[in-house]
Image: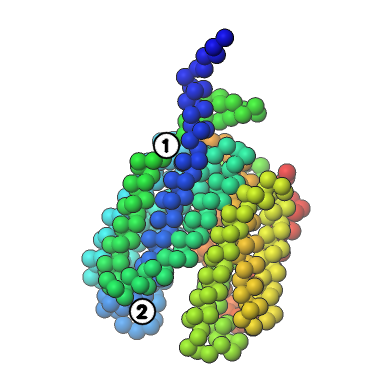
Amino acid sequence: MVRVIAAPQAEADAAREGWQRNVYVVTAASFLGFTGFTLVMPFLPLFIAQLGVTGVGPIAMWTGVSLGVTPALTAVLAPAWGRLGDRYGRKIMVERSMLSFVVLMTAMAFVTRAWHVLALRTVQGVFAGYGSLSVAMAAESAPRDRMPSAIGLVQTAQRLGPAIGPVIGGVLAGVVGLRRAFVVTAAFYAIGLVVVWLMYEDPANTDANDNGEATGTAFQQVTFKNVLAFENFVLMMAVIFGLQFVDRSFGPVLPLYVEQVGIAHASVPIVAGVLFSITACTGALGHHLCGKLLRRFSSRLVITAGAVVAAAGSTALAASGLVWVMSVASALLGIGIGAAMTASYSAAGSVIPARAHGAGFGVLTSASLVGMATSPFIAGLLGGTSIRAVFLMDVVVMGIVGLIVHRHMIE
């Protein structure tokens, strides 16, 4: 007897068979975008100086405002873009975002005033958001049991891109100049745009019932209040904020700390750069390993353990100024935060229905961006009193994260 499969079910089966391709496409596009962005942004102070701004204070002011305006606007608008992605498809939303970056990064190569940079960065903040949408695309493409691995793969790419982007950008700036480096960045986004356009297919907008069968549910209105009511969702927002807060707290103080503990001034950039790279690479390893860990252990245990490991790394940084100890501490911080971050996104993603993935992950991204924006400011103020106090603050934050997850996360 030949079994006839209904067209909607056949389409759903085909979509499930192609989930790996979707995840690889999103991973490649994320890597290209995050690498391209960090080709030039670390060198923005030098570019501002080339535009005629003089003096350390004015250069720092223009650079700080220009760098801060984009994540600030993205934090506000990410849930809205995500919600539009839920309604009209995430593929077109990512294409929109990446196309805007192609245009705006190209325009950066032709600016003549510092306020031009600020204006373009403001527009970027309005149209950005492909980071959270990429995570949502991976989450909705993968089967539920493979969601942590899919999210971890995308976050690994998003972590590795910034690790190697500044190195490539430094070489480019020396060879072709900062202006042409912006054009190269635009080319990275253009390649990512083409990859998504040609190879990604939006999954059918369906949810699954308890037996894993597609229900064919059409898009239903999902409010942000609905999203916040999902089990563990607000807790995961707080956890993601805390993890991002600690992850970004080292930028303003680590080079100063390296010099403070006795490293020769000429060697400070090298040592600090190595420590940042260790944290980035082990963070990527944590993202990647999280999927395997979650097959054996609960999200609650992985997040708690990750917070404990990160707290141990912060403690080691505060306790010793030996380079090898700081290297081990940086590795502990990276792998602990990386694993806990992916586990947090996976725990939240597991309770978000497919029709609300964009809005849900957009809200989570907003929590992450708020942590990213506030951490350097607070770390800088606290570091003015004592740099070790920053590391001790991180121990406290990670301790609180581990404690509230262990006591309050519902499994």
Query: Which structural element holds mark 2?
Result: helix
Residue furthest to the right: 407
Tell me if residue 19 comes above or below residue 111 in the rendering: above
Residue 201's disc is 1
Does 150 sit left or right of 62 as displayed? right
Does 127 sit left or right of 401 as displayed? left
Cα–Cα span, label 1 and label 2? 46 Å
Compare residues 391 and 371 and report the one nearer the observer: 391
Residue 89's disc is none
Tell me which numbered mark, 1 or 2, is placed earlier along the sequence. Answer: 2
Examine the image and state in which quarter residue 146 appears.
top right
Residue furthest to the top: 1
Q: How many circles with numbers are drawn on the protein?
A: 2
Question: x%, y% of residue 38?
Answer: 41, 65
The residue that appears at 37% across and 51% down in the rendered structure is 192
The answer to whether the residue labelled 1 contacts the one labelled 2, judged by CB atoms less than 8 Å apart, is no
